[in-house]
Image (spheres, rainbow, N blue to C red):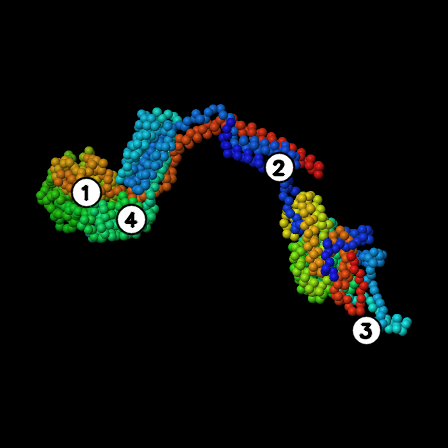
Amino acid sequence: MGLLAPLYALATLAVVGPIVFHLIRRQPQGQAEFSSLMFLQPSPPRLTRRSRVEHWLLLMLRVLALVLIALAFARPYLREQDFAAISAAGERVVVLVDTSASMRRPGVWEQAQREVDQLLASCGAHDYVGLYAIDSRLRPIVPWDTVPTWTPSAMQQAVRAEFDQITPSWHGTHLADGLMAVADLLAIPSDKEGPATTDARIVLISDLHQDSGLEQLQGYPWPATVRLDVRQVQPRQPGNARLTILPPDVNVPRERVRVRVENNMDSVQQNLRLTWGHDGHPLPGDGTVVQVPPGQVRVVPMPPRPPSGDCIVLTGDAWSGDNVEFFLVPQLQEAEVLVAAPPVASQEDDFGYFIEKMPLDTPWFQRRVQRVSLHELTSAIGTKTKAILVEPHGQTMFPGAVLAQFVRQGGVVVVVLAHTLETPEPVSRGLSELLGWPPVAIEEAAVDGYALIGAINYRHPLFQPFADPRFNDFSKIRLWRYRRLHVPEAEVASVVARLDSGDPWIVHQRVGAGHVWILTAGPQPTGSTFALSSKFVPIVLRMLAPDDNRAPHHTTIEVGQPLRRTALWSESPDGEAARAAELQVRADDGQPVGEADVHLEEEVIVFHRPGRYTIQQGAHTSTCAVVVPLSESRLTPLDPDVFEQYGVPLGRVRSARERLETARQLQIGELEQRQRLWRWLLVAGMIVLGGETAIGGCLAQRRRATE
Amino acid sequence: MMQNKKPPEAHRPQVSSDRRWFVDPAAIMQIRNLAMRAKSVVEGFMTGLHRSTMLGFSVEFSQYRPYVEGDDPRTLDWKLLARTDRYYVKQFEDETNRRCYLAVDQSRSMAYGSLAYNKAEYARTLAATLAYYLHLQRDAVGLMTCGVQHAQYMPPRHRHGHLSQLMHVLALDSEGTESDFSGALTRLAGFSHRRGLVVLLSDLLVDPDTLFQPLGYLRGRGHEVLVIRILDPTEVDFRLPQSAMVRDMETGRQIYVDPRTVATQYRQRFAAHEKQLVELCHRRGARLVRVTTDEPLELALLELIANTGMLAGHVPGATKRLGNQRAVKEVG
């Protein structure tokens, strides 16, 4: 005999009520008035032997009715089996631990270790546990693939052992990537797990800050059988501040360094100090004190850089892991743009005039425009020449072979067909040499008044900035005359923009490491209104530096961010031998950096630790500063309920004991539901109450008759 | 001296066991008009006096004495002078300046009654009876109601219409309040500048110590004080039929009372309280008479006559005018 809801059995204590009421003399029904109570004392109701004896039967009936009803609510059942033999089904649990840089904060990783220990302690003997680490990439520590071969206890021991070997990295957080990958793994049950283990849980151990990278979960269909248990760990002291060295401004002297300081919303400190440092350590001095309230941003100019200062150190916030920013003196690069155009009488017909008026300089590049003739072009190409604008005309020879060599080494050639070609064959031949195409036909197009831009490939990098409807109006550009270029069928994809007649307007072809652009109409007012359009400057600038017009070769990148080798040096290594030389990365102390800190690929370099590195290949040397990702500095914690917004069901991993108790309660509930003894008890209680009512009524009637 | 005696208990009117001589108070209370009630009682009482010898006294007295120089010639008995040619002066008790103050308690506790009428009704009738009788005796009668929200005070007068006005005030049906009998007596002592007889009609269900000072004020004014304590028979021996929640009519407080349990204790406390009242009145020179509402009203009237005569003998010059001697016998 057992009770499904034993707490209701406490209601049997209510039998004390009728017993006490029976022992108390009945209160008088009538009231009387008296002149004064000054001679009277209250005489309270007393227990009388007479009452107990007189209503003994009623008392027993009332007590019995209460006991029966209370037992009915307690849901009794008769044991038919041994509930101790019940065992809870195993669960599939994958621990996804955040190893990003923010987990290095004081107290966070220790708390994560405690969470893992608690989780493993609460696991049962049939629970499979896997372990993955996630920062900017997912790393399997105890992979889920081992489920078919390992036993649950072996996996738990492996998780316990392997977790002690993990340490947080310096990478950013891409939690969504890890969650989606692990959820996909768990959504496919393996054969060994059996039908009893259909549900799975992901235990996410993370500090869960605002830049944890959860946005990708928005469009992910989360598996219904996988639930997420978020165990958020907190640092000992909340808040963080981050400094960023701003790029030089044209309005500010280059020697003045400006620093942007951002304080997190949950920060406690607001008095921060900025100091010049060397090798990551602050130099002696008071530095600059800046007050940044929580959630605010301040831009402050730094004092003049001391000779030994190579970094700026921020002090005063809760975490010092992201407080060093290396300062690299930006080296101004000089580039040369050659304009090979025929002499013209008026500026309206001079394409070079418009190029000279363009703002070609940037904080890292200084471009100089040099006019040459087509005959002098071969000799004018130097090491600093980055782009050549060619305007063939008349019967001039077109140096296709020279330009092709220049382009293959990374140069940019812009061919502008601005003038009517009396004999187009030399140009056609030269273009064939330059582009590697078969000879293309060039002829003067017949324009009825003017031609308009008819089609633009906005996916092309040249026109991507104009894809927005606010900027994609090219209808004001009118072409008075242009040359019809017959692009081979195989190279149709190289046409970036066409005119309303269907003829090409801009053609782009990548040759070797460089780029070739062909404009079939002159931008100058004698050919079109393109040079007078607002689109002219951004389009020509992107033509001249199509790869990366902004990235300097001395750069600051984040941990985990790929650095392309082509952006390392201002001048390309001369010759194949130089390019094939081994690339070496050294730390600030001159020691080579191991694979744990840097990952070298064919095209890119990925750093795993912040610091300043020297990259050397042959005779070329470049310096690179690697900083903690900015996303790891905005550490205002998120509410775990944010996962509900992304459609991720949350659920706590219950301990084996809880699951066992739940299984036992289910068994008992099923047994009680089958027996339903409460109905009989309730009926018996009602019958007893009916009898009590009848006997009580008779007694009351008899008493009234007696009175 | 009377003050040296220690009365063992409150005075009870000494009446014959044969009550057929008196009118049943329940019958008197059937009369709605208060003046008619008083008249019925007094006239019955006066008739009974002529028939009864047991009382043994008369209020009529006269004498002759020789005329001395200086007497008012109007007092000469002209008929005797004509018949005998001698100068005699005829003296009789026909004028008085006695002032009587009736203080009637109408507090809530007086509304209690186990009979067909309550104590307040009884006290009102008794006061009316006394007033009527005193009026017949040519005494000035005043009235003060106590224990009501708007207390009434009528100074003692003997003029035409005063008695009917007094009856009207007595007949007013006023709602009683909590008893402040001692305060009312203190105010009465302040109003009554000329000495006289003060008759207090109350159940005296108050702390006896609160009456000590007001009675002293009244006695200090030179008043004779007769306290008629009116009680319901149930209040004397506490005859509650069954257990009940008993509500105090004064304060509204309720307690559960089992009469079998508390009756003995009640009687003991009641006796002790009455003893305190008797001792208090004795010390203050007042006389306490206990009347239950089932007793004839005439007895109270008789008590008044007996006690006032008795008291007058101990307070020289309180009520009598020179040359007009009134014959009063002490009773008890």
Residue A543 at x, y percent in the picture = 19, 43
* Residue A612 showing in the rendered view: yes
Chain letter behind tag 2 = A
Where residue A373 sits in the image (x, y, percent)?
10, 45
Q: Residue furthest bottom?
A: B69
The image quadrant of residue B165 is bottom right
Say if A700 sits above or below A260 in the image.
above
Judging by the rendered image, the residue that carries numbered circle 1 is A588
Q: Which residue is mark 3?
A: B72
In the rendered structure, the residue with mark 1 lies on which chain? A
Q: Which residue is mark 4?
A: A316
Q: Secondary structure at mark 2?
A: helix
User: Disc 4 to disc 3, how far (Cα)?
Assistant: 126 Å
Residue nearest the viewer, comparing A350 with A164: A164
Give the Cα distance between marks 3 and 1: 152 Å
Q: Label 3 crowding class (10 Å Cα cut-off): few <14, some 14-19, many 20+?
A: few
Which one is earlier in the sequence, the residue at label 4 or at label 1?
4
Which label number is shown at residue A22? 2
Residue B204 is left or right of residue A635, and the answer is right
- Front label number (1 vs 2): 2
Q: Are marks 4 and 1 on the same chain?
A: yes
Q: Residue under mark 3: which chain is it in?
A: B
Question: Would you call the spot at circle 4 few (<14 residues within 10 Å), some (14-19), or many (20 or more)?
Answer: some
Distance from Cα at disc 2 to Cα at disc 3: 90 Å
- Name the residue: 72% across, 60% down: B3
Q: Is residue A143 above or below residue B174?
A: above
Q: Is residue A640 left or right of residue A509?
A: right
Sequence order check, earlier mark of 2 and 4: 2
Determine whether label 4 and label 3 are within 8 Å by CB: no
